[in-house]
Amino acid sequence: MALPANGTERLVIRLLERRDLEEVRCLHNHDETLLRLTDVWHVSETQQEAWFQAVSSSRTSRRYVGRRRADDALVGVFRLDRLDSWNRNAYVGADVVPAMRRQGYAEEMFAYFLRYLFNECGLHRVALVTMSSNTAALLLLLVTCSRDETRRDLAIRVTTNLAELAPTAGLADRFVVFDNGSTLDEHLTLVPPGTIVCRSERNLGYWSAIQWVLAHRDRLFGQPFEYLYIVESDLVHWDLVPLGVCERFLASEPRAACVRTQEFSVRWRWRFDKRWQRLPFHVLRSQIMLRNAVTDEKAWFRPAAGLEGVYLSNLHAKLPALNRLDALDRVFGELSEMASFTERDFFRLMMERHPYIGVYEGGLFCSAVSWANRDRFVTASYTDEGHLARLGYQATRAARIERAPGEISVQRVGVA
């Protein structure tokens, strides 16, 4: 199955050759490639040579490389597997070098190969299998403001936590930190390479920080996104990989505004109900109200069709969740026009666009601050507003959005 000559305007595309093997092996062994594959074992030089011998003589698999015409740099590998010439179908896939991603190369390779496979090879069907952890349309946002030692320690803990987990979910290069005038900023040295750090010299507030990122995200990353996952600086995660399942839920359920990922169990929901916090086995760190804050309806949960572990619910949307960006854009646009607003205004405006939400069973995070240890930390929920103001913090439950936030410095970590 030889290719017609030979690629796109930017790429030379040809069959894999022995001279490509070491670069292709390094691409396979890179964490951001390896953790997206079904086989997550590293490959040695000897194993790579044996694999090359097998795939070169296979009648059902092919491997092609795409190299940049300008300098012959490896851009990626295109996979053709389970080729069935009798029934005229096959499986396809591609791996792009991390430094070359978000530049349209994968789209170029797929467009080229689909034309080739359908028009030249006479295939009738090709299939692409993706992992449930695929989060290609998702942007990860952490908002921080550390102006006392308790918030500094929380920010260090949460930033370290996300730096460990973001690469496993393929989010290391789609991670933005907005820092709101921190005077204790050690946490900013802990973000992984590729993170974009946005810094304001003064504390604009939580809502204004989110609005700034919403307004500037395309320029920051040079690509569109569909979903925003917001993390507050006292929320500790144990996993980010299931965000891919949550993304698939939102893609299939237009009635849902977001997917809540706070620690929670539908079956054992009474353990998280704020009304029962004095009962044994209550989960203080993740308690919620099991009523919709806008309609006052009792919460219900229905399993999502075809997605295990996700439920459709009539609860209201929340910011620390996986949210639809188009909904956030419109809602924050309306909030920006208000002299002041409350969380309830946000809940109501989101419900007007999408009446339901999703809930991920078990959750992905809990709060490091709870009713039990609230006296050890400065928080918007539990600390006196006068004390917050003296430290330079702003309330979050009632707020306004800054229309002229001033200069925000932007730096991509690991890039001079």
Image (tube, rainbow, N blue to C red):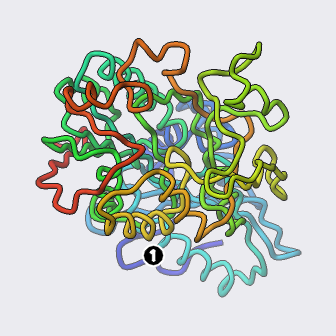
Residue sitting nearer the eye, 392 or 26: 392
Image-based side of 350 in relation to 120, left or right: left
Which residue is more in the foreground, 194 or 369?
A: 369
Q: Residue furthest bottom?
A: 119
Q: Residues within 10 Å of mark 1 (few under 14, many from 20)?
A: some
- State left or right for residue 31 relative to residue 154: right
- Seen in the image, is 23 located left or right of residue 200? right
Q: Percent x, y for residue 392?
A: 20, 32
Q: Locate the C terminus and report the quarter of the image it occupies.
A: top left
Query: Is 282 rendered above or below residue 232?
Result: above
Q: Position of residue 64 (x, y in %)?
A: 55, 61
The answer, for residue 131, to whether it is visible in the render is no
Q: Residue at x 80, y 50 (%)?
A: 300
Residue 191 is drawn in which quadrant? top left
Circle 1 residue: 7
Using residue 345 as the reference point, say whether residue 119 is left or right of it.
right
Q: Which sits in the foreground, 72 or 237?
A: 237
- Could you tell me the amino acid type at mark 1? Gly
Q: Is residue 186 above or below residue 251?
A: above
Q: Which residue is at the far right?
A: 86
Q: Is residue 48 visible?
A: yes
Element type at marker 1?
loop
Image x and y of residue 222, in percent: 32, 64
Q: Nearer the viewer, residue 345 or 95?
A: 345
In this rendering, the answer to whether 115 lies above or below 33 is: below
* Above or below 25: residue 348: below
Residue in view at x 49 percent, y 71 percent: 107
Q: Say how many tags the image has.
A: 1
Q: Quadrant of the N terminus?
A: bottom right
